[in-house]
Image (cartoon, rainbow, N blue to C red):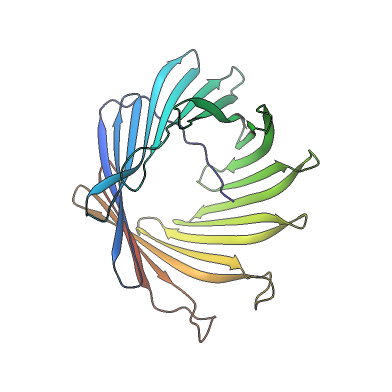
Amino acid sequence: MKFLVPVFLAASLSLAQQSQTTSRTYDINGLGVDVTSFVNRSPGSVERIETVRNLNGRRVPVESVEDKVVSESGGVKIIERLVKRYGADGRPGPPEKVHIEERKNADGSVNTATSVMRADINSTYVVAERSLTESKKSGDTTTASTVIQRPTLNGSLEIVEKKELVKRESPGGSESQNLTVLQRGINGRFGETAKQVLEKTVADGRTVENIAVYEATNGQMQLVRQTVSREVTGSNQKEVDVFEVGQAGREGGSRPQLREQRLVEKTPAANGTVERISIRRPLDSDPNRLGNAQNVGEVICTGTCK
């Protein structure tokens, strides 16, 4: 189950900005695989291109996403997004167009309507999904309700999924967030299928973030994954514990068990930053003890790094 967080495009950039980010992962033999993203930002436009190296060593595109603000006035902003995905030979597949309309209302609420259109082999665009999100803020609490429509067998659009988000923020940076996903069942009724609960505390220069993911099993919500991250302000280091529920019939049963500990260290580099990632996993001989850290990847960013 994937949880999507809305991304809002900043349109008031005064100067063009560029960045390049290379994510490198290592296999068990220490060989690295690179995925490089190029981002170009200019007033009212953001373009992102993701590339990899093919068997011949040439860098070929995997996906490109271009956002353009086509209009913004009277509290209404319209963004057009063009998504292209490429095959292993670098040839583009059928493109995808996304129309995003964000409307700020007089009462402070925000309505965001999104339409996704995909092209078939004949380059004819058809609606693949529509969603409408209404967001309201009262004091330190923000609530957002989303309804998602997709085509049915008869071609009409019907609501198939709903999302409910409640977010509370504190002045010091602490926050809590509860996201619930409801899907239509075969009886036409909506029921909870997934939930994500986030608790973030910031105190004494230390940030602790706890994210728990639940999924519906036999009509009941059960914890399937939990991550706990700890970071000290100014240290440029983060420690993340990943817990997962064991498979049925195995030791641990339905209890979350520590599967790995991620160590993330970010250091400044020439014209950017380098983020190195290592992992410690429980020993086979003693699951209650963690083994030595193993380098599994790094993220190198140059230019205007976010």
From the viewer's perspective, tell me whether residue 92 is left or right of residue 269: right
User: Looking at the image, which is closer to me, 109 or 146?
Assistant: 146
Q: Residue at x 47, y 20 (%)?
A: 77
- Residue 183 image point, x, y percent: 70, 42
Q: Is residue 32 left or right of residue 124?
A: left
Image position of 191 with respect to 260: above or below: above
Of all residues, the one furthest to the bottom in this rendering is: 285
> Farthest residue in the front direction?
122
Examine the rendered structure and indicate whether residue 3 appears above or below residue 127.
Answer: below
Q: Residue at x 35, y 68 (%)?
A: 27
Q: Name the residue at the top extreme.
A: 74
At a point 31% along the width and 24% down the height, the residue shown is 43
Give the quadrant of residue 181: top right
Q: Quadrant of the C terminus?
A: top left
Q: Nearer the viewer, residue 299 or 233?
A: 299
Q: Is residue 182 above or below residue 127?
A: below
Residue 135 placement (x, y as % from top left): 60, 30
Residue 82 quadrant: top left
Residue 265 visible, this orientation: yes
As displayed, is residue 125 above or below residue 238?
above
User: Which residue, as the protein is rendered here, is positioned at the far left?
Assistant: 270
Count of marks, rendered view: 0
User: Is residue 276 visible in the rendered structure shown here?
Assistant: no
Give the x, y percent position of residue 90: 31, 43
